[in-house]
Amino acid sequence: MQKQALITGITGQDGYYLARLLLSKGYEVFGMVHGQSHGRLESLRRDLPDLRVVRGDLLDLSSLLRALELSDAAEVYNLGALSFVGSSWATATVTASVTGMGVLNLLEAVRLRCGEDVKRIRFYQASSSEIFGRAREVPQSESTPFWPRSPYGVAKTFGHYMTVNYRESYGLHASSGILFNHESPRRGPEFVTRKVSQGVSRMALGLQDRIVLGNLDARRDWGFAGDYVEAMWLMLQQPDPDDYVIATGRQKSVRELLDVAFACVGVDDWTDLVVVDEENVRPAEVDSLIGDASKAEDRLAWRPKMSFEELIRLMVESDLAKLKA
Ligand code: G4F
């Protein structure tokens, strides 16, 4: 029998990769879209013609109940959030609402829809490595204490604990994936990997003369989004819900990202091509993150497939091709 899945945040990078994965597995996939129109929806419909669209808003409980009823989803993936950490200080209240309270609204809608049959719907929450913030141990695992450093990180921490609480209080099949940074050619241009891949490509074609960045010493554990959505799906196929760190276990700095990206277009020394502007430096930075995904490896048999170097090359090549076209 065909299974139905509902994905919030469908117009984002992960929404696309997850919908594509579920469609390839034979699911009927509903993507939830808020507002009257959404710029990215038309291209998403072109890329995934079998995707079905439902209207709904994470801030509107009755719209969530309607979306659950309309889709009759057996699996719900909550990817919806204001996901750019850098702007979350300027929009702290709306970030807390959508990225934090939105999780509670959706959990509540799932609980109401399930009624007595609490396992009728399986729920995935997109948790984030940002909850570790000023990390208290290296590498970070499911048992590492949280210390979020941005309004975004605080909101994600609330969403994470609410997911755990609904599992423990009501017995919902609710799992939380603590995903470390994951990128792709579909990454928004405000995130550092895409800002660099686009900048390097534009410079190679003579369209730009420098890249303006913030903290070049920040270190992240960067993986490929296409690999990470498989982990989301695997979590919901387990008999019992749980929390899992999803990461590569390898860490690179923004400087190393620049080394790899510039090397793709034959530039060895980028020092005169990159400018640091305080505008891009955050009020409270997360300096260093690296994940330990051994639980996911043991229990889900999940492993990342694409290396950092392959990922950055894919992104630069994709940006070059788009610019040339
Ligand atoms: O690419 P970023 O903006 O990603 P960040 O803040 O780590 O968050 C991303 O990953 C999280 C974990 O999965 C997600 F929860 C979150 O939604 C998002 O997807 O920045 C990475 C690092 C930061 O330390 C930042 O300060 O790069 C540093 N950086 C240096 N210059 C810059 C820049 N980041 C951006 N966006 N732009 C710069 O010019």
Image (tube, rainbow, N blue to C red):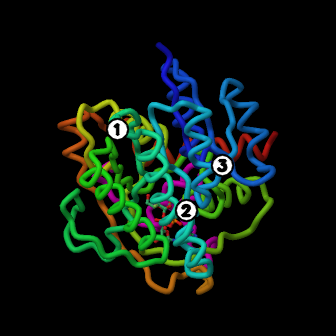
- Establish whether ligand 1 lies closer than 8 Å to the Cβ of label 2: yes
Circle 1: element type? loop
Q: Residue 83 — which label?
A: 2
The quadrant where residue 178 appears: bottom left
Comparing 213 with 77, the one in front is 77
Q: Earlier in the sequence, mark 3 or mark 1?
A: 3
Q: Which residue is mark 3?
A: 56
- Quadrant position of residue 317: top right
Is 254 in the magenta? Answer: yes
The residue nearer to you, when weighing 321 against 195, is 195
Q: Residues within 10 Å of mark 3 (few under 14, many from 20)?
A: many
Q: Position of residue 138 (x, y in %)?
A: 21, 66
The part of the image, by quadrant, that contains residue 185 is top right
Amino acid carrying mark 2 in the image: Ser
Amino acid on which the number 1 mark rests in the picture: Glu
Q: Which residues are magenta?
A: 247-275
The numbered dot on residue 116 is 1
Is 147 located above or below residue 269 in the figure? below
